[in-house]
Structure formats: structure tokens, C-alpha cells
Image: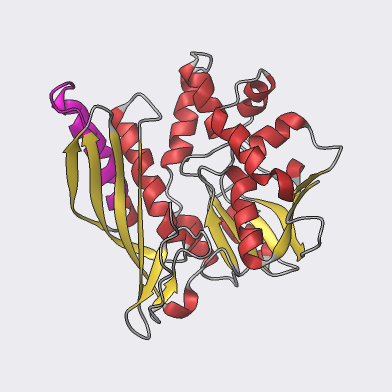
């Protein structure tokens, strides 16, 4: 497929050039619009929880850009003649509850009949043009902070195989349905050079995107990364989704891994996440981390450091 033409609008602050989480368009000296869209097939059985997770995932892009969501629109694919409409209502109710929690207004949406259920949101947010957080601004010397534990993809695979306890399923549902609103609000009080949220490319893939866009090298301290503890057991049993292997292959040429890093842990670092946490590049990591913990985000960890780019690659795992 031919490349799309490059946008040259002078008001386009963030477009397609840096693989960012959302587009940002300046409409005045004090306001820029953040626009994003995301939807996917069910990853949990309960329709209400699926709606919550899908909505939190879509809203996360606005938080990663440093903004505040103001409106959202439903995107729905549903086999209306095959499944009970109650399922659809529960999906939409879950999404609406999370949109309400975010402070945004649900203003409508669009649905199509489809044999496979899909749900998500188109979200519009606002941010001051000078306070946009992209993935292209990380600087050597920055600390890297991750605000949610990882491992949801591996555990979701275990759930599908009926190998995970109901309590563990409940645990990861709440992790995925949790908005990134609070960490975004906290980070707005600190100097932040870059930010992204951890989703389908896993921690490795998204860290690599930041490194490449910022022309720096990322050092990830594997043992510092917050994990959902049960993910190690399941990954050790080989319950690793296909997406995780794809993420490792995507990063392979730009990746240096210390001999001391457990291969199982490396799988978790590459694990594809749904509605994961924020990865924040900041020159004031200790202060930000303290504020996150004081704000109730006890899983947040300082997981790495930004360094000058070397010919050896963009991403190093120690």
C-alpha cells in the first residue's frame, strides 16, 4: 500500500510521524484538541467489564498526551440477530460508566451489524499547546516511570485455557478497567519530557517507539518493572500469546539483553497489554514517583533511564 501523503497543516502539532498515541491539533493559543479512536474484540467474558476495559483503553491515549478527555462516541459492532440485546446494553453501560468517571461526556456513536463483537470509543480531549506530551521528547538523563503492573496478556491467555482462578481474573479486570486519569493529573505537576501508554506492543515495543522517536537509548531495569506476580508462573509454563512473540521480533534488531535477564521475564516485558499504565520520561523521577505513591498508585515503579543513543541500539535490558 502506498504511503499516505504527509500532512503539512501548521496547526497540526502531532500527526502520524512519531507513532504517537493520538493526534493533536491547535485551535487557539491556549487550546489544542486531542483526537483518538480505539476498539477491539472482547478479552473477558462479562460484557459490562468488557465495556469498562475498552473505554478505559481508548481514553488512555488522551491521558498519555497530557490532556483531559471532554467527549466520547461509541463505536460498536454487534450481531444483533444472533445475540441477546442485553449483552449489547451491558457493554454500553460499562463504557458509559467509565466515560462518566473520566469526566467526559458521551455524546453519541455509531453501530454496525457484524458477526463479531467489537467495542471502543472515539475520544476528543483538550490540552494547552505548550503542555502536549508526545513520545518524541525523552532526553538523556531522564528517569522512566511505569504506573501499572504488566502481564495482562499472558494471564488472559491462562484464563482462556481455564487455568486461572476467578480471583485472578477479577484482579486483572480491575487493573485494565482503571483509568490513567490519576497518574496523568499527578504527572501534570512535574516536568515530563515524553509519555506513552503501554498497550499492544508491550513495554518493550512502546519503550522502543519512544527511544526511536526521541533519538535516544532506553535502559530498562528488568527487575524493577512492576509485574502481576502470577504472570511469571504462566509464562514459565509457555502460556505466552502470539502477540508477545511478535513484539519480541519487532524489537529484536534494536535490543540488547543482559545475560542475567531471565527469558521468562523478557517475555513478560514484551507481553501485549490492554489498557496498560503510562510510561513517563521525566528528569525528576524520584519526586514524581513519591507523588504517585502518595496518590494511591502503589504499583508505580522507576523502571529505567534514558541515555545518549549509541550504535549498539535503542533499547537495553539489564
Q: Residue 235's spot in the image, x, y percent?
A: 65, 24
Q: Quadrant of residue 232?
A: top right
Question: Is 145 displayed left or right of 68 in the figure?
Answer: right
Residue at x 18% of width, y 39% of height:
112
> Residue visible at 47% across and 40% down?
274
Q: How many marks?
A: 0
Instruction: Left or right? Give the position of 34 relative to 193.
Output: left
Left or right: where 9 falls relative to 230: left
User: Is 17 placed above or below 154 here?
Assistant: below
* Magenta stretch bounds: 78-100
The residue drawn where x is 51% and y is 42% is: 200
Q: In this view, does 195 lie above or below 119?
A: below
Do we see residue 277 in this rendering?
A: yes
Q: Is residue 99 magenta?
A: yes
Say which of 83 and 256 sits in front. 256
- The image shows residue 155 at horizontal and vertical percentages of 54, 26
Amino acid at each position: 500500500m502506498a504511503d499516505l501523503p504527509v500532512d503539512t497543516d501548521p496547526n497540526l502539532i502531532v500527526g502520524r510521524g512519531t507513532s504517537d498515541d493520538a493526534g493533536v491539533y491547535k485551535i487557539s493559543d491556549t487550546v489544542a484538541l486531542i483526537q483518538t479512536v480505539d476498539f477491539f474484540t472482547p478479552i473477558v467474558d462479562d460484557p459490562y467489564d468488557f465495556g469498562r476495559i475498552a473505554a478505559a483503553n481508548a481514553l488512555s491515549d488522551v491521558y498519555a498526551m497530557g490532556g483531559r478527555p471532554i467527549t466520547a462516541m461509541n463505536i460498536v459492532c454487534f450481531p444483533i440477530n444472533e445475540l441477546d440485546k442485553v449483552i449489547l446494553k451491558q457493554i454500553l453501560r460499562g463504557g458509559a460508566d467509565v466515560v462518566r468517571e473520566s469526566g467526559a461526556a458521551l455524546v453519541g456513536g455509531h453501530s454496525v451489524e457484524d458477526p463479531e463483537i467489537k467495542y471502543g470509543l472515539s475520544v476528543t480531549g483538550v490540552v494547552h499547546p505548550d503542555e502536549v506530551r508526545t513520545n518524541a521528547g525523552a532526553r538523556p538523563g531522564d528517569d522512566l516511570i511505569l504506573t501499572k503492573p504488566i502481564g495482562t496478556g499472558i494471564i488472559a491467555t491462562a484464563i482462556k485455557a481455564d487455568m486461572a482462578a476467578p480471583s485472578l481474573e477479577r484482579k486483572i479486570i480491575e487493573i485494565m478497567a482503571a483509568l490513567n486519569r490519576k497518574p496523568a493529573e499527578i504527572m501534570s505537576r512535574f516536568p515530563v519530557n515524553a509519555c506513552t501508554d503501554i498497550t499492544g506492543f508491550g513495554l518493550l515495543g512502546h519503550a522502543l517507539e519512544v527511544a526511536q522517536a526521541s533519538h535516544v537509548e532506553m535502559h530498562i531495569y528488568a527487575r524493577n518493572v512492576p509485574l502481576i506476580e502470577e504472570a511469571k508462573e504462566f509464562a514459565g509454563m509457555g502460556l505466552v500469546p502470539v502477540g508477545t512473540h511478535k513484539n519480541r521480533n519487532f524489537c529484536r534488531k534494536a535490543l540488547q539483553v543482559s545475560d542475567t535477564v531471565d527469558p521468562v521475564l523478557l517475555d513478560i516485558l514484551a507481553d501485549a497489554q490492554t489498557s496498560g499504565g503510562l510510561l513517563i520520561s521525566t528528569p525528576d523521577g524520584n519526586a514524581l514517583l513519591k507523588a504517585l505513591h502518595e496518590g494511591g498508585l502503589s504499583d508505580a515503579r522507576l523502571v529505567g533511564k534514558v541515555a545518549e543513543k549509541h550504535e549498539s541500539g535503542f533499547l537495553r535490558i539489564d
